[in-house]
Image (spheres, rainbow, N blue to C red):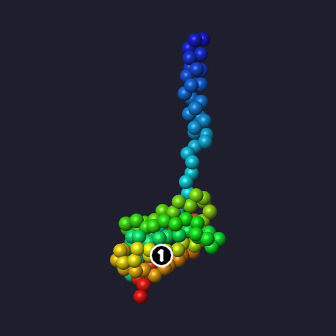
Amino acid sequence: MRALARVAMWLGTFGVPFVIACAYGVPVTYSKTGKVIDADTHEGITGIQVTCKRAGAADVVSTTTVGGDVILDTGSEQPCDTYEALDVDGDANGGRYAPASLPGGSGGFTLLMKKAP
């Protein structure tokens, strides 16, 4: 009887909090990942500002890292209506690029940018 009481006490102390933690899980973070590349060289472009627009308004803004990769922490699973790219650092990334846009979607994206004339 005493052994049964110890098992019950152990389950109450260690088992129940574990079950509760599993039931609620880890909070979900929503993000969109993409890449911005040069249309001619197909190399990633660093320092490009990428905007996720929803209903015509800028929802999330981020800047590309080395290699042109970008992560937009959107906060919801709702897709972006449009992705827009703007060269905010001028010649620091190898030249000036013309603004570009791409229709949104629920998956990853690749934006092609051409050098400004």
* Residue, disc 1: 86
Q: Residue at x 59, y 34 (%)?
A: 19
Instruction: Report the quarter where the N terminus lies.
Output: top right
106 shown above or below 88: above
Q: Residue at x 59, y 30 (%)?
A: 16
Q: Residue furthest top?
A: 1
Q: Residue furthest bottom?
A: 117
Residue 65 or residue 111, whichever sits in front: 65
Identify the image quadrant of residue 46.
bottom left
Q: Is residue 57 left or right of residue 92?
A: right
Residue 41 or residue 48, whichever sits in front: 48
Q: Residue at x 40, y 74 (%)?
A: 89
Q: Residue furthest front?
A: 89
Q: Residue at x 48, y 75 (%)?
A: 86
Q: Position of residue 48 (x, y in %)?
A: 44, 72
Q: Residue furthest right?
A: 55
Instruction: Report the quarter where the C terminus lies.
Output: bottom left
Q: Is residue 48 visible?
A: yes
33 shown above or below 100: above
Q: Is residue 107 visible?
A: no
Label tally: 1
Q: State the SS at label 1.
A: strand
23 shown above or below 84: above
- Graded by Cα atoms within 10 Å as few (under 14), some (14 to 19) or many (20 or more), the crowding at tag 1 reads some
Q: Is residue 93 left or right of residue 105?
A: left
Residue type at mark 1: give it: Leu
Q: Position of residue 38 (x, y in %)?
A: 40, 77
Q: Position of residue 29 (x, y in %)?
A: 55, 54
Q: Position of residue 111 (x, y in %)?
A: 48, 74
